[in-house]
Amino acid sequence: MTTTGSATMSTRTRAGTVPGGAPWRAVLNLAKVEAWFLVRSPLVLAGLVSGLVTIWAWFWLNPAQPMWWVADWRIGAAQLILAMTVLFAAQLAAGRPRRDGMADLYASFPATASTRTAAHLAGLAGVLPASLVLAGGGVALVQLRHPIGTPNLMVLFAGVVLVLAAGAAGTAIGTRFPHPLAGLLGALGLFLPVVLETALPGSAMWLVPWHLHPDELGWIPGRLAGYPPAGLHAAYLAGGAVLAGTVALALTTRGVRARFRALLTAAGAVGAAVLCLTGVLQARPVPVAGLNRLTAETANPISAERCTTASHVRYCVFPEFGQDLSQFEAPVSDLLALLPARPGPLTVEQVLLVDFNDSHLTYGYSQQQVQRWDADSSASISSSVIGLLVGQWPASGNLADADFQVALATAVWAVRISPVTGTGQCVALNQAREAISIWLAILAAHPPAAKLQRSLGWPGGSGSPIQVGNTVVSAWGYPYAYQVTFPGTQFTEAGYLLAKAMTRLPEAKVRQVLTDRWATWLNPRTIDAQLAAALGIALPKTPAPVRASGPVQLPFSVCTS
Amino acid sequence: MDEMTMTVSTRTVQVDGLSRRYGAVRALDQVGLTLQPGITGLLGPNGAGKTTLLSILATVNEPDAGRLCVFGLDARDGPERTEIRRRLGYLPQELRYHRHFTVAAFLDYIAILKDIFDRRQRAEEVARVLALTGLEDRAAHRIRSLSGGMRQRLGIAQALLGRPELLILDEPTAGLDPEQRLRFRELLSDLPGDSVIVLSTHQADDIAAICPHVVVLLHGQVRFTGTPAELAATAAGRVWAADERDGRAHLSWRGGDGRWRHIGEQPPVGAELVTPMVEDGYLMLSHTAGAR
């Protein structure tokens, strides 16, 4: 070959173009554009809004006070919704040239397919604002509910990594499959294993993009060391993102330099290694020390709680829950102020109901070990203790139900009803003290009248028949959304109706009657009719007790002490 | 090919021994060409290999054999191919668009793909090609709202981004109305004379109007290179005008004046010889190639 002309390369350079190789500048410039497209993408915005609405629904439609060790993980679950739409948007972007019939034109440009793919991957920075707004908005929405604890930044970070990893996966899919259906299926594919996680063995739940149902966290009084394995899961997702990005680039690196191919292979190997290693590491069982501690805390909560005494009542709460102490105290103090006399010392303490058989908590341990934990964690609550279940206390603003339940539990203690017997639960059937306890609780906590009105029509609670001894009677229960006290007490409709009649009398008159013969009223043998007579009212009509037609499983006994 | 001696110029595009097959179909067969600065019209029937040739010139496709040298740069070499692409503007035959992009955003995006990184210069360049193609008032419109003709102009606009030294236009006037075609001719005429422009079209009158050079591609082979006048001259003495149709003609059709135009070896009865046009030359060549 002979060459004419003074140079191999033309000396003429177009305005604005870069004469030498400029793949990185092309990547950066294209990435800016792609990022801006993603920022404004209706899909991404829809994901953001859906995520925020989901967080709002989780924490604002649910009356329970959020606990950050559940809430931060839930915010990550909301990021999954954004991740799905980001995957779809990234797939659409990466498949755009082929889908729009412009592949030939694009192939004529100096910016190669791998440059464009790299730009799409770098452009995923455009979803960061949405992801950060979702995380920040989620934190704000939770914070407004006065949650317990503080958010774990690593969990929130892992949620952001989830979105980026989904974007990288979308880019890889779009590079190979430009049809929108591929993006849709990819998004659903991201969600499907999460939905199916309950069918997976416990340790496998970390292999799905996000563990969507962290319900087991809602019953523990704080963070368990290394659980959930947020850092490892973030690394796991990052490994997946690197691998997906590498696949996307590998699909478009026809004719690139060997050095770049080697770099890509190395990156892919690192991504795969991180994915596998963290996949194995995060599936390790929850450290035995943590579960042992949880067992001990469940069996004997006071061992881990901080206790204070106010008005001769001992309050014990787990360290994280100090802020709720005044809320626990209020209904107890209000009720104690109504009592003519106290039966003895009272302790109000938080209690745990942890299900150690939940494989999401105890995966990796033998059934024998799990049963041992389960047995070791069983606690018995004395009659001088009012237990408050961790995870059930309502967010401030919804305290009426909880206050009434605590007041009722305090009143039950005050009238010396011990609802738990050695063989099960008992009911203070036709005992004046039952109506007195309900009256005291109504007076102390002032539950909403409408709810009290509804309390008789509550399905499964009030009005439903229960067997007490050999008798079937009509039950009464307050229609609360969550049971905050433990153990609960079963009341009868007759007791409630008498208490309701008492509320129509002047308070001073009722208090006088009660104070005059307090010891008598607390006697299990003092019946409703005697109390009604002392108050000068007719005994409210209740459905006549019916004899049980046959043996009923787990009937209530009559409280005798 | 490596042993082939080829004189390479930094001002021309040279094609040598280019062949390309699609399965059993031979799209290009040993095509050799030198494209000089100025406009070269590429004529040929459907399936002649025009689009394949243009896509190889645009470095989109690679030939099975042969060599492409653009301004002294070898398209087989990676870095040189990239440099060719920097100097290239290409309008493929069937171009759909990112329909949700605005016109300006689309051109800006393409400008980045063409390595125009400076934002200000990119904006100027986009404004320039919009003005050239008469799309200034459509800059903010989404592509999906454009008519077919406007989209074709947008395709031309993107090809003109970066003032390419090699401009490859595959049927650029398809979908344009007569006025737009005239504007297109005007546009091409205004381009720098030292650019190499290759224009594939079925419109022989476009070739006659604006192309100093013509290449006729038939059955994957170059059958003619020269000027439009020379192409027309290939039919000299074989184009006739008569009042009646003559069955011996290779081709005949009735013109707007009601007289029959015949292309053939034998003059029809009462016919008079007329000066051939580019179209006549092309048709004569097509017929001859078909007869072979």
Image (cartoon, coloured by chain):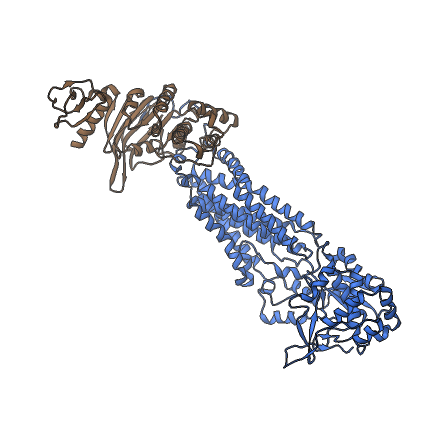
Task: Judge whether A306 appears above or below B76 on screen.
Answer: below
Q: Nearer the viewer, residue A387 or A174?
A: A387
B272 left or right, relative to B119: left
Q: Nearer the viewer, residue A393 or A229?
A: A393
Q: Percent x, y for residue A543?
A: 70, 74
> Can residue A258 be spotted in the picture?
yes
Q: In which quarter of the image is the N terminus of chain A?
A: top left
Instruction: Identify the colour of chain A in the image.
Output: blue
> Can residue A312 be spotted in the picture?
no
A30 left or right, relative to B262: right
Task: Judge whether A23 appears above or below A8 on screen.
Answer: below
Task: Judge whether A202 appears above or below A90 on screen.
Answer: below
Q: Percent x, y for residue B133?
A: 42, 24
> Residue A68 is drawn in which quadrant?
bottom right
Q: Percent x, y for residue A157?
A: 61, 48
Q: Which of B124 and A59 is in front in this view?
A: A59
B34 left or right, relative to A521: left
> Residue B34 is drawn in which quadrant?
top left
Q: Quadrant of the C terminus of chain A?
A: bottom right
Instruction: Identify the colour of chain B in the image.
Output: brown
Q: Percent x, y for residue A97?
A: 42, 39
